[in-house]
Image (tube, grey):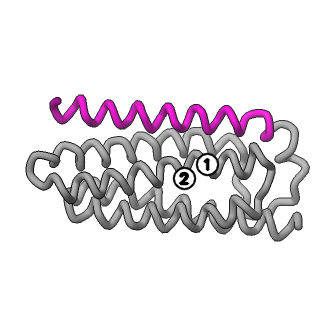
Amino acid sequence: MNKITRILTVVVTCLVVGYFSGMVTRSAIITWYPTLVKPSFNPPNWIFAPVWSMLYVMMGVAAGLVWNRIDFDKENVKKALTFFAIQLALNAMWSYLFFGLKNPMLAGVEVVLLWLMIFETYSKFLKINKIAGYLFIPYLLWVSFASVLNISIWWLNK
């Protein structure tokens, strides 16, 4: 499999995960989410879809670049991609916990684990391919912001 095919495969996988996460989110955005007290720094709802779409593409490109190094550093690439898969699963789980179960507290606990897995993935990617690591920085920053937002929403609505 060539580099472009690997990148496209992971980008599509990430976008599919994002799509299914969005399905969990859609009804709650209209019904439940507007009833919550939110902090002053809460962004408008329309910003989330384009930001997440961009982040999923960047994640996929990063993972594809790392996957492309499999023939040169099999053990480290496999380990890095395992962390990638874990963080992607945690990413999807957050939407289910927050919007599906309508449980900001549980989602707040989970987002800390997600952040740690993203940071570990970033660290592993950086060692294999610098660009792949750099592509994870916006994701890490956004989830840092989302963590503060999540915990603030929980605090304001407990």
x and y, in percent, of residue 111 in the image: 61, 62
Callout 2: SS: helix
Label number found at residue 93:
1
Split into 4 quadrants, where in the image is the C terminus?
bottom right
x and y, in percent, of residue 106 in the image: 72, 61
Q: Type of residue at label 2?
A: Leu
Taking the image as shown, residue 91 lies to the left or right of residue 5, namely: right
Task: Name the residue rendered at 60%, 33% in the picture.
Answer: 20
Q: Type of residue at label 1?
A: Met
Label number found at residue 158:
none
Contact between labelled residues 1 and 2, with CB atoms less than 8 Å apart: yes
- Report the span colored magenta: 1-29
Task: Name the residue rendered at 44%, 61% in the picture.
Answer: 118
Q: Main secondary structure of the magenta part?
A: helix
Position of residue 31 relative to residue 146, above or below, is above
> What residue is pinned by disc 2?
90
Q: Quadrant of residue 61?
A: top left
